[in-house]
Image: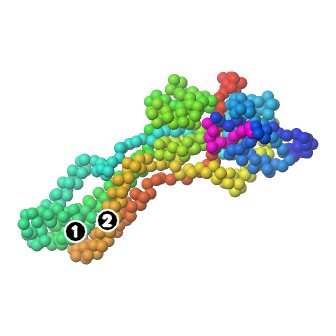
Amino acid sequence: MAVDDFYAAHPEYSTRLALHIRDSSGDAFGAAAAEWDARFNNLTVEGYSIDIFKAVMRELPYAPYEFVLYGDRNGSSNGTYNDLLYQIYLQNFDGVVGDVTILANRSLYADFTLPYTDSGVSMLVPLKNKNKKSSWTFLVLLDTNLWLAIGAFFIFTGFVVWLLEHKINGEFQGSPKDQLATVLFFTLSSLVFAHREKLLSNLSRIVMIAWVFVVFVLQSIYIAKLSSMLTIEQLQPTVRGLDDLIKQGYYVGYMNDSFMPTLLKRWEFNESKLIAFNSPQDYHEALSNGTLAVFLDETPYLKIFLNEHCGKYTMVGPIYKTAGFGFAFSKGSPLVREVSKGILKLQESNEMLKIDEKLRIDYESTMVSVKGRGEMGMLEGEVKIVGELLEHEFRLKAQQIFARASSSIAPVQSAMTAQYLNLMSTIKNGCKNNKMKNNNISHITSSRFDPSIPPTIQEQENA
């Protein structure tokens, strides 16, 4: 019998949908939450999963339903989602609405609709505090040997130019003090291609071409190192995968009453290294003080946690793929097919986007966020100011300097001028845009009381 024919023949029938009680943590982004209003003696339901379910059921006007609170009116839950699904198997309820993960062992007791959001198991890992930043951090971008080589080449270039020019070029003559000052200023100004002195010797011109090339290469290396330090190097996770966890014997956390212990045992984790937590605040403290190396949970919940603690953690994975969140009905219920069709229609419409927008979750800080902005403030300011000053000075004097340059090095310096301007633009943009963005948006949920394995399902797994 079709669904619409069944309800036409039984107009008094109302599908009873059991709803999981609100978590005691009072998470504002509840996927499926319920509260009993004693003043008006009615049940108030809300949440991401509830909004999706109501939108689907609006397309099925012939299928009335009512929500039944699974728990007492004081807000105490009578069990987990596995317990709730078992109530469907016992025919005490017709369905379950909430952030219920579709699992193989659960499908033995209920039929699931198509998933209304993707999911999977991921790892929450603290970010490495690789360097304690200070205003002198720019000096450690290059190693000591390279700094010594630059200094040696700097002195050598100045000496060779002076040796070739001081006998024939009046600009390099004078008292020893004046000659030393001229050579040092000439070599230093060549770092930004702003040297004023005209070279008369062809050999000194060749030396300067080599030096200018070396300066250009060093600038490229320095800017690349600076960009890496401000972004990528700070965002490396402390653990990269399951192999690291197993080999190093790290402590791994998971939410109490979730299906993670079964999964971890399947991956041959040491049970003594597994720690259960009751709330996000608990595992946040454990990760912060180093008690816990990694926390495993489903991806939607970790995204919400990362949004509230941006810059301290990153998410690795998913390391295990699940079918997602779905609605559960009794075995053989014709509503499974009809609700699944409604979910497909909803996902193809704009209404799904509106439901997602109600959560007001910004995913830009989910995977990447730069840490230590206060420590890096002085360095970023210095780099930007120096870059702007150099660019301004160079724009004013470039034409005058290179107009007097020898024709033998003019083509080389003209090419490097254009490349230098691009580098200056890169240094400015790098300081302003030091946040990497990840706009990989998926449907999310939160505030769940994830299930432990009840005796009936556990026996099935052991079998």
* 140 to the left or right of 81: left
The quadrant of the image that shows the C terminus is: top right
**Residue furthest toward the right?**
9
Give the Cα separation between the discs numbered 2 and 1: 16 Å
The dominant secondary structure in magenta is loop
Q: Nearer the viewer, residue 8 or 104?
A: 8
Horizontal and vertical percent position of residue 415: 32, 69
Which mark sits nearer the N-terminus, 2 or 1?
1
* 400 to the left or right of 44: left
Vertical arrangement, residue 392 with respect to residue 152, above or below:
below
Residue 195 occupies quadrant: bottom left
Give the residue drawn at x 69%, y 41%: 32
The three-letter code of the residue at mark 2 reads Leu
Is 34 included in the stretch rendered in magenta? yes
The residue at which mark 1 appears reads as 195
The residue at which mark 2 appears reads as 389
Give the residue drawn at x 63%, y 30%: 257
Q: Secondary structure at mark 1?
A: loop
Looking at the rendered image, the disc whose residue lies closer to the viewer, 2 or 1, is: 2
Q: For label 1, count other residues whose C-alpha is less than 10 Å away and answer few (under 14), some (14-19) or many (20+).
A: some
Which segment did they paint magenta?
Answer: 25-37
Residue 116 visible in the displayed image: yes
Residue 266 visible in the displayed image: no
Give the residue drawn at x 71%, y 39%: 34
Residue 79 occupies quadrant: top right
